[in-house]
Image (tube, rainbow, N blue to C red):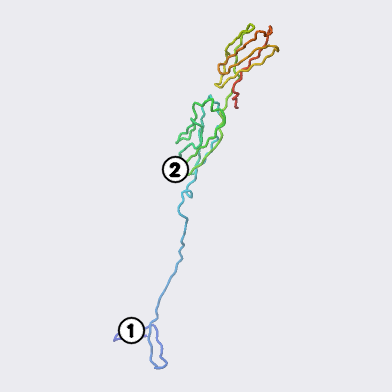
Amino acid sequence: MVGTKNGFLNYYDDYGYDDETGNIILYNVDRRYSECDIIELFVYKPLNKEFFTHPPKIVSVPPDRVNYKEKYIYNVKVEDLDPNESFRFELNEYPEGMGIDPFTGSITWNNIQFSDIGDHTVKFTVYDKYNLSDSQIYTLRVYSDNKSPILSPIPDQIVYQGDTISFAFNYTDETPDTVNFTYELLTPGLTGNIQIDNITKSFTYISENDTPEGTYQIKITATDEGRRII
């Protein structure tokens, strides 16, 4: 519909009547158009390196026995699902003298001593570049194939009544452990005093003035510490 306002020609969208006055009422319709869309909002936890990376995994089995005369070597093997990983190794629990290469993970123990014979706990940890880690703990046994000491033949001895005889034992032992000597009187009737000194490794017999004459057998035994651990 066309109408005039303030001397200008205007176009109106629609019109109506005022029932009381009979006048025509002109008005425009507010032509508002709309369009909608849906968006998706994703909410995540804070970034966590473990979500994107994998920890290293120790896959090798440690050698758990070594002779004290030998050198101990354990070449640790590690796997990781992430490509181009680099690793760092450290020992957490270990016997004195043992070491680990911080880059290759090779564990070595040189100059193992006889006193190291026995069981030792070993624990080490590997870290990747994100500080994710894996650990391995095991028991390492240091053993000895110990053999009996060898006692050199002892010459027959002559002693007179009331006199004293003394001599040192001659022996060899493959291991540097302590060797002690004991005796056993196989022939009864010998009087006097028999002494063995395990510090000087010597034998002493003090006869009495009335020790019965005769031939007596005395058994001498050499015994080491028995540290034969297999």
Q: What is the C-alpha distance between the residues marked 2 and 1?
A: 77 Å
Residue 105 seen by the camera: yes
Residue at image position (37%, 83%) is: 12
Residue 64 seen by the camera: no
Question: In terms of depth relative to the viewer, which is nearer, 92 or 50?
Answer: 92
The answer to whether 182 is drawn above or below residue 43 in the figure is above
Would you say 5 lies left or right of 140 here?
left
The amino acid sitting under disc 2 is: Lys
Question: In terms of depth relative to the viewer, which is nearer, 188 or 3?
Answer: 188
Residue 39 in percent (x, y) is at 45, 64
SS of the residue under disc 2: loop
The residue identified by callout 2 is 129
The answer to whether 125 is drawn above or below residue 13 in the figure is above
Question: In terms of depth relative to the viewer, which is nearer, 217 or 5?
Answer: 217
The residue identified by callout 1 is 10
Indicate the quadrant containing the N terminus: top left, top right, bottom left or bottom right: bottom left
Marking on residue 148: none
Pick whichever of labels 2 and 1 is earlier in the sequence.
Answer: 1
